Amino acid sequence: MLLRGRPRALGAGALLLLLIGFFLFGGYPEYGLRGATVLDGGPPAGLNHSACAPQPPLPPKCELLHVAIVCAGHNSSREAVTLVKSLLFYRKNPLHLHLVTDAVARNILETLFRTWMVPAVVVSFYDAEKLKPLISWIPNKHYSGLYGLMKLVLPGVLPPSLAQAIILDTDVTFASDIAELWAFFAHFSGVILLRLDRLRQAGWEQMWKRTAKRELLALPATSLADQDIFNAVIKEHPDLVQPLPCVWNVQLSEHTLAERCYLEAADLKVIHWNSPKKLRVKNKHAAFFRNLYLTFLGYDGKLLRRDLIGCPSQLPPGAEQLQQALAQLDEEDPCFEFRRQQLTVHRVHITFLPHQPLPPHPHDVTLVAQLSMDRLQMLEALCRHWPGPMSLALYLTDAEAQQFLRFVEASPVLSARQNVAYHVVYREGALYPVNQLRNVALAQALTPYVFLSDIDFLPAYSLYDYLRVSIEQLGLGGGRKTALVVPAFETLHYRFSFPSSKAELLALLDAGSLYTFRYHEWPRGHAPTDYARWREAQKPYQVQWAADYEPYVVVARDCPRYDSRFVGFGWNKVAHIVELDAQGYEFLVLPEAFAIHLPHAPSLDISRFRSSFTYRDCLQTLKEEFHQDLSRRYGAAALKYLTALQQPRGPA
Amino acid sequence: MLLRGRPRALGAGALLLLLIGFFLFGGYPEYGLRGATVLDGGPPAGLNHSACAPQPPLPPKCELLHVAIVCAGHNSSREAVTLVKSLLFYRKNPLHLHLVTDAVARNILETLFRTWMVPAVVVSFYDAEKLKPLISWIPNKHYSGLYGLMKLVLPGVLPPSLAQAIILDTDVTFASDIAELWAFFAHFSGVILLRLDRLRQAGWEQMWKRTAKRELLALPATSLADQDIFNAVIKEHPDLVQPLPCVWNVQLSEHTLAERCYLEAADLKVIHWNSPKKLRVKNKHAAFFRNLYLTFLGYDGKLLRRDLIGCPSQLPPGAEQLQQALAQLDEEDPCFEFRRQQLTVHRVHITFLPHQPLPPHPHDVTLVAQLSMDRLQMLEALCRHWPGPMSLALYLTDAEAQQFLRFVEASPVLSARQNVAYHVVYREGALYPVNQLRNVALAQALTPYVFLSDIDFLPAYSLYDYLRVSIEQLGLGGGRKTALVVPAFETLHYRFSFPSSKAELLALLDAGSLYTFRYHEWPRGHAPTDYARWREAQKPYQVQWAADYEPYVVVARDCPRYDSRFVGFGWNKVAHIVELDAQGYEFLVLPEAFAIHLPHAPSLDISRFRSSFTYRDCLQTLKEEFHQDLSRRYGAAALKYLTALQQPRGPA
């Protein structure tokens, strides 16, 4: 889909934004839910309980439909995604989404839509910040209330070339094709269109402002919600309203009108809800509502990444190159699966949960790691060991992302943390894209330094403070390329008392309760750290790169990215350390730093690797290609890596 | 839904089974896929490429629609479930499913539909075995080919009162409401109806048999598929055919006609495919096909468990009592979540994968256990340690069930095993229903004896043989109530060399590499096994029950079931052992038997338990209720359990 600041011109049509979104999706004010004073207890006459009008003819095949959504903050962004999934599931037309967002939602949704790559979807963003002055004079209890009020000014904000748009709240789920709703635009008679036109000339803006100001005078209210204003304007100008069949805004309630609607209808078109309160409402039709919502909550969004049937292809940016690259892969190549996995563009939902980090300190450091569902139980311990900011990439299905959400909500330790950012990377393909995940987490770190760790490691309790002090004392920054090495240990016992100091750690090491990391299977990985020297070290000491070195390091955020060709579980960190060395990073081991790897059953993803011969063969090929790339980029300086590679060695 | 051998009478209408299913879902023979010789390379004239006829009016709201499906074997049963999910997702009418099944499919689907509890769905089963003689004279290469041919005799098999039915292959996915298809029945003109009626009087049976026999004479074919016969009959009687718009049987191919169909249409109604070959077809519309199929493959079936909008409630058997029981729960009760979980009816798909056990031996024993996704990696090791039959309950989401399927297919060890039955119990609710899972696995064991184990235990390599010999030598059976105790050990090291004998095990125990199970946290659980005595024992010895005893035992299959009130992770096995003791089982410890628990990170489900105070409080309440039940059932004999409960103790 195309991401633009301003949408394409749509022809010379006059502004004719029918406020159908309002009629549809705000017909019954949410008593008490929006913290609003309600002007009129009953719904406006003629609203939402019209006899079921026949479905007007659908718009022409492949006609572009416009949808506007106001969305701010982390939670609202998640809601918007579920709404959009339901839209995409049933739609058969190209869509243009007009998203009015704050900076948080824009950051999230821009990344998401860019990586979602849905054909025949164009997305435009509008800065909600700029709209605030237009409505901030209206007293409002909630920060979010301000965003609700933005619906009032949409006619003036959306491009003048836009003739019509459907405005949707984020707490709406579609149960049918939005084209059926769009069809009602054609249904508006010429008379009504004319009146709207006159109205536009007379000025909608004046109209709602006048009404709002009068209501404010007449009421003892301390706040006024968008819904109240809409209701009041309509009361005054009932001819503005085109009633729609009730099936287009079904709400779950004990309300007679809603009840009558779903008794008479066979087919509900749009469900308006998703507040947690309503999910628990006891109502014999609750299951229909809940299940439709849950359907799209857990729906695998990648399945919506498909061309429209019978419409000209409208590929999003990058999709064509991607298809070409995929088409060029040789299916007979033993590395086919690896290359395909590497090319896969995973949907990414950054800051999936609310995240309010402190302003970054100049020596601050973010712990960067990635995980999948089977490591969720590490998070609490990690939070106890690392009070600082974290940027974590989670490789999940859409359904797992919801489980993850509930997991965090149920954990006092996790939900208390404001400085842990969780970035969901949606699963796709058979191989674990470990380096793509690391790159997502790394790109989202907001501090000047990052600790590139792994989820199975618990840092020393003091590590966060110690790293910040060390960074400051060592005078890092200012172009000095340094990687601080955090020595790695492991315990093979799954009941384990974590050492509170280096002295305690050394005692455990001597007692055989701890080992240096991968001491038994792969000592080369950490040998250059020189654990013997570390035992005695009082100050940081420099070590030299050697083949297969893969220490856990602290570096500046602008460090090289991980090489995404390494998917699955081999050589992914080694290649990154080679890259650091090639770029001239010095490796300094910190004398008081340590982290300990906890034991765990091998993950399913790693089991697959270990049992596959193809995997090992292919890894060798990928390594060689990596070294060829190194030579191209670093010339003769890269020779040492190739030489090291060709020396006899143990298992990779 | 109602399960019946014979469907309800539908009025006095004459048999008028329109073979729409055939026109729809077999229009293009699957060249090469069905192992059939094809009579006519091209599709019959007028088939599948008619101009898109307008959609006839939908049937009356709440009209019952009839669907017939022939289904045999494990794999076909899985396919049928995906088809039914797509049907249910879009349907708005009550459905009557007529399932022609072999014993395997009936067993699977009867259990599934009974536990699925979908309102407004009636299921009738027809024994495919009885239809075989009607068609077995037709030469056939495949066992499955015989089931294809059964579509020919459906008119005579379905109840005479049934006026019309849609016949579906299992490799079909709906992309729309089946009522739109049903509507075409009304579209058949009176003339065609008349002709069909005349045809019925003349005898459809004679017609297809005559054709089939003639084709057999004329062709050098060694087999004849149902599709070939249908094609030949139609060629002879083109007036039998009512062409349907192509969108009702879209197939993924490079075929011009199919291509033209999805270029002209905006909306595909039925997708016909699901062979793995086609999933890989490269075609620009492949994504639509694949994604629709994958949607329902992983769709959470419990979301389809909802009443129809605007139709009289048609609850399946047990649903009303269940709703009442749920309504009577007190939401303020601290055990509310536990009681609700206990009442939950989980969908159960028994023998999810092909399973061909040997005929049971009189002393044979099945290993019974349960697991969720995070323990899949135990299965290979378990298979290496236990060559005998296993009955395993897996607690999975629908999407995870597909991952599990791929996991088994990718494992040579697992896919080679014919005697491991996997029963999928679909996830629902927040608490792990450990005892319900055990009961599912126990109920499906086919041997006279069962080893009630846990998934984290690896049995001694010799255990399977040793148990069978012991059962025989001890003369178990014949009403003697005996539980053979398999002593349990554990390792805390996650790299571990499994002892090949009792002597080796004892050496590891002495070296501190192994412990008796839960030695550190909860020695009471296994203390009565008397490990000191076991060290020296040369023959089985009897031990007495004591409070909190929870050994792993081998018992006759007709042993008491687990108490399903214990959900989550507390006291679930203890209660079962109490029940055995109360029923007079003697506990005999086997001197050469052992199993070793492997370490693992705590599962998410158990983490939730450990961090919850409510959980522990509630567990106490459940225990007390359990003992009250014991007193009611066993009177004074149950006093000892209550006394034991009231004694001071460590953590439960």
Image: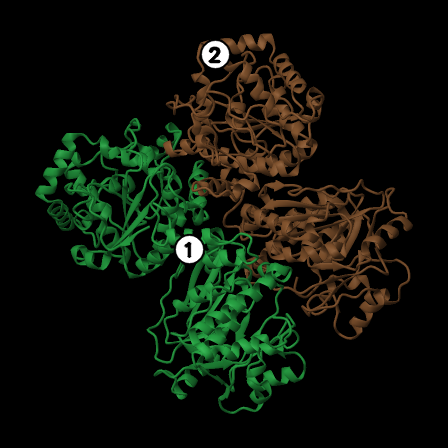
Chain colours: A brown, B green
Residue located 53% across and 68% down the image: B624
Taking A110 as reference, is A577 left or right? right
Question: Is B465 left or right of A153, judged from the image as shown?
Answer: left
Q: Quadrant of residue A213?
A: top right
Q: Which residue is mark 1?
A: B347
Label 1: chain letter = B
The image shows residue B345 at horizontal and vertical percentages of 43, 56
Residue A85 appearing in the image: yes
Mark 2 sits on what residue?
A192
Q: Amino acid at mark 2?
A: Ile
SS state under label 1: loop
Tell which residue pokes out farthest to the left in this image.
B202
Q: Height in image: B331 above or below A320?
A: below
Q: CA distance from mark 2 to mark 1?
A: 53 Å
Question: If the image is split into quadrants, where does the C terminus of chain B sit?
Answer: bottom right
Badge 2 vs badge 1, beta-carbon distance below 8 Å = no
- Height in image: B92 above or below B396? above
